[in-house]
Amino acid sequence: MKDFFIQYIKPITALAVLAFMVWYFAGIVTYIIIATFLSLLGLPLVKRLNKIKIGKYNIPHGLSATLTLFTMIIIFGLFILIIVPLIIQQTNVIASINFDDLIAHYEEPMRRLNEFLIQYNVIGSGETIAQYLQSQLADLLNLTRFTNFFANLVSATGNVLMGTFIILFLTFYFLLDDQLLKNFILLLTPDDHIDNIERILHQSKSLLVRYFQGILLEIVIMMTLEAAGLLIFGIPNAVLIGFLGGLMNVIPYLGPIIGATIGVILASLSELSTGNYDHVFMAVITVIAVFAGANVVDNIILQPQIYSRRVRAHPVEVFLVIILGGKLAGIVGMILAIPTYTVIKVIAREFAQQMKLVKFLTRKM
């Protein structure tokens, strides 16, 4: 009975306590996770810079870490400089839509839609779809809502600035000492489990680096494919749509649907702003076709490389884990499902390798 407790109950209890601590300190853990992710991406550059010689001397390690952090900040800043003007342009596009002409052009379809909605009690019998949309828009633009929005925006900006500072601070020190987090974890580890935890940290780091690099590569490729495809077919704001569509691929399975939906909306608004009402349908079909084609490449080539080979898990296993993550924590849960599951599998194999289920799930690791 004692051996059973030591072999199974004790490690499971430890995992439960660890999971509770991660949940309770979710904010701090999130900063550490983001900083760890950025440092893992930046460490190869740090190592390359360390090998560069100026005269007889190598670049100091502290300078290499600083240059790497600034490089990452500059890359992110360039993305902002490219994307923000496109977003502002899209805002101006929406503002330039002539709603009177739009309503007049779609008067007959709207009349039919109005009859359909009245028939199924979506709107009242004395109300039109135009009046319904107008009331919803008025409610959306309510002054109180705007006041609360800007108050929340100011509050959120403060939190974002503080969060950014914390992440940059942690990232710098993780780049400066890539063993810092590992040493801290080992410091909290009982002596009789030091070897186990070292193996867990080593293999988890290896698998997560491969996974995160794969995800980053997938996002860049999807951005390129979608933006290029939309540019070829002359869709307005192709770069912005491609950027947002590719970025959504960070959300497994659901991301491409969200990205395509955003793309359809932006393309439709661009056509409506120029008065090309008859082109809207073709723009929608084109966006859907480009996203569908890009996602065929993603599903056949990219995702098997990332989800199956890099984290060494079966596609069905990956799918179920992502669904469970979404059920527990929504979009964030879906994003974190695979890396979290990967770490749990490594821990389970180390401490509960006698269990048949653990043997089956970790057979490829």
Image (tube, rainbow, N blue to C red):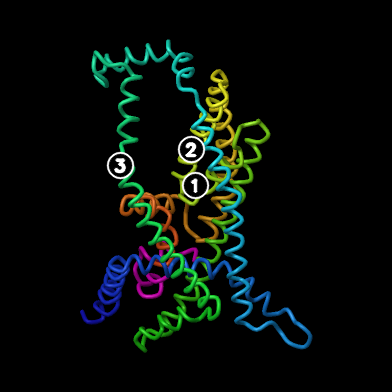
Residue at 58% over, 50% down: 302
Report which residue position mark 2 lands on. Answer: 262
- The crowd level at tag 1 (other Cα within 10 Å; few <14, some 14-19, many 20+) is many
Q: Secondary structure at mark 2?
A: helix
- Compare residues 183 and 31 and report the one nearer the observer: 31
Residue at 47% over, 70% down: 204
* Image position, residue 7 (x, y; %): 30, 77
- Compare residues 201 and 329 and report the one nearer the observer: 329
Identity, as a three-letter code, of the amino acid under mark 1: Met
Report the span colored magenta.
345-365
Which quadrant would residue 226 be assigned to in this image?
top right
The N terminus appears in which quarter of the rendering?
bottom left
Mark 1 vs mark 2: which is more N-terminal? 1
- Outermost residue on the right side: it is 55
Identity, as a three-letter code, of the amino acid under mark 2: Ile
Identity, as a three-letter code, of the amino acid under mark 3: Arg
Report how far apart the C-alphas of labels 3 and 1 lie in the structure: 28 Å
Report which residue position mark 3 lands on. Answer: 145
| Tag 1 near tag 2, CB within 8 Å | yes
Q: Secondary structure at mark 1?
A: helix
Report which residue position mark 1 lands on. Answer: 248
* 24 sits to left or right of 80: left
Which quadrant would residue 109 be assigned to in this image?
top left
Give the overall secondary structure of the magenta segment.
helix
**Nearer the viewer's eye, disc 3 or disc 2?**
3
* Image position, residue 237 (x, y; %): 59, 37
**Nearer the viewer's eye, disc 1 or disc 2?**
2
